[in-house]
Image (cartoon, coloured by chain):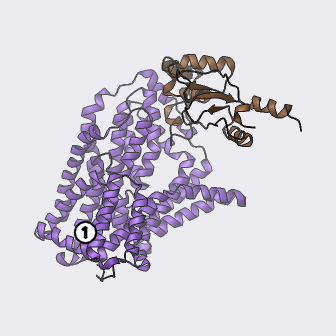
Amino acid sequence: MHNIHQPDVIFGLDPLWFAGALFVFTYAMILTERLNRAIVSLTMACLMILGGVLTQEAAFQGVDFNTLGLLTGMMIIVGITKDSGVFQYLAIWSAKRVNADPWGILITLVLVTAILSALLDNVTTVLLIAPVTLLITDALKVSAYPYLFAEIFASNIGGTATLIGDPPNIMIGSAVGLSFNDFLFNLAPLSLIVLPLTLIPIYLIWGRKLVADPQSRQQVMNYREADAITDPRLLKQSMFVLALVMAGFILAHDIGQQPATIAMFGAAVLLILISLPLSSSEQSKRVHKAFCEVEWTTIFFFIGLFIVVYGVETTGLLEMLAHQVLDLTGGDKSTTAIAILWVSAVASAVVDNIPFVATMIPLIENMAVTFGGSDELMPLWWSLALGSCLGGNGSLVGASANLIVAGFAERAGQPIRFLPFMLMAFPLMLMSILVSSFYVYLRYF
Amino acid sequence: MTAISLMDPSPTVLKPTDTISTAVQEIMQHRYRQVPVVTEDGGFLGVFGVNCLLKLVLPKAAVMEKGLTSLSFVYESLGDLHQRLKDMEHEPISICMKQDVEIVTPDTPLVETLLVLYRNRTSIPVVDPENNKLLGMISYWDVGEKILSADG
């Protein structure tokens, strides 16, 4: 918890109201999508400083560089790795393992999506898997919709399983000091339960309709996955670095290092490996290209958002809200955990889960005193992670991965409409939250 | 000298309602790189050319924005590609013509016109900014002839 200070706010305004108004306005602007969210968060962050709520120095204290470093490092690694063709290889290889059977392919693509989302991040994963999915469904002459729908769910469920799978987990892990293993042991088991459960209704609705003629299936069987590997040397280098980074994440606690350092070091090592044989000018081009793979819009959105939330936090507003939440739940930890789970899920389905989680983190931190210390908050953190990650499945705007898949569907002439998607996805998401409620209650209380 | 003095004022044109089959025949027969597409009253809409043809025979997943950057693992015969084109031949060209085309106006200066030509590597439309009417097309050959026949 941060010390509450009374800053000198512009025009002598009450800092709590001024910061609160900026915060609400930030949310509203993000929700309307009238302006790019990075512009909104950076503008509001600057207003927090210009308005006198924070000094520039204090604002920088609010920025979680561990989250930013982890995101940036992984973006660079994945950005370089994808040029090897390994992701297309995996998708094609898995499709051929089931003899190009349409339903079998849906299952294997779901598995590939979920695993990659857990090990990399779900946004990058869908960017790589969705085009291959469209290629395969085009060849099979089947609708891409069930596949893309299932992949949206797989990306968010897979992303729930690890520290690096989904931005909310990165933020929670960084703020609380949770390790890769903590997420793996606490959340991965639930992902393993929810994923097959989600496939049941998908099968009942679409499964039996997915039929392809032998000629179309043969076309997919004719794909040569080995030829998808366009750069074998890069593949070896990337796999070596990815293995190193994964080992680093697993051992981070033992070696006393933060995930951001591990991801950034992995990115640096990979950059060295790919640059060594090149001339100086070629190296510059390659490094420039690698840095272009970073989604700077997302990074700057995070920076602005961290400052806005920190500004609100320093005024004591979030502490007040935390007390309100505790009053509502009667100060009971299990009720609070389940409430956080459900509220996070519904909120994440309708608003961007990143600002929501950024707000919830200090709010939950403020509950430590009531529940007897930081260690007692663990069930609440897992509830927040589960709610915000799985809640993203509730609608098309629930997670960035959903919107990316929808974009591909639109360009392929098979649009995923907001309402039909929500009518199917929201109940499915609620089912996963119901399962999560039992899981949280049985495991932690 | 400006763009208007470089252009061919009566180029071959296509209508948005023309079928893909008609358009393909036209560009293959005359070896056009691209043909302007105009409304009944001459309003400029876009172009249909060899790139559109390639777009039709390639898998959608590769030609879409942020799509596959390599198809090294896909093995299809010419027959497969022909079939893909055949499936689309009765569709109007409006579904696949290129609309985000760089144009010049009649008053675009000579060197700027050449720069646009150089950037696009294909014939460029001359469009009246007042009413969006197609006035003509400028090809490499038109420009080449003009430059070669000019006095030093």
The residue nearer to you, when weighing A299 against B36, is B36
| In this view, B53 is above or below A71 | above
Is B106 displayed left or right of A37 in the figure?
right
Extreme residue in the right direction: B152
Q: Which residue is mark 1?
A: A378
Query: Residue flagged by tag 1: what amino acid is it?
Result: Met
Q: Colour of chain A?
A: purple
Q: Report x, y in % for residue A419.
A: 27, 39
Extreme residue in the front direction: B130
Instruction: Kindly identify which chain the residue marked by label 1 belongs to.
Output: A
Residue A439 in view in this figure: no
Estimate how packed mark 1 is, as few (under 14), some (14 to 19) or many (20 or more) residues with alpha carbons within 10 Å: some
Q: Report x, y in % for residue A292.
A: 56, 56
The residue nearer to you, when weighing A248 against A320, is A320
Q: Report x, y in % for residue B38.
A: 55, 25
Residue at the spot 67% in from the left edge and 16% down from the top edge: B29
Residue at the spot 17% in from the left edge and 55% down from the top edge: A438
Q: Colour of chain B?
A: brown
| In this view, A77 is above or below A224 | below
> For numbered disc 1, what is the local secondary structure?
helix
| In this view, A398 is above or below A361 | above
Residue at the spot 49% in from the left edge and 32% down from the top edge: B60
Is A396 displayed left or right of A407 in the figure?
left
The residue nearer to you, when weighing A417 against A48, is A48
Residue A149 in view in this figure: yes
Extreme residue in the left direction: A330
In the rendered image, which quarter contains the C terminus of chain A? bottom left
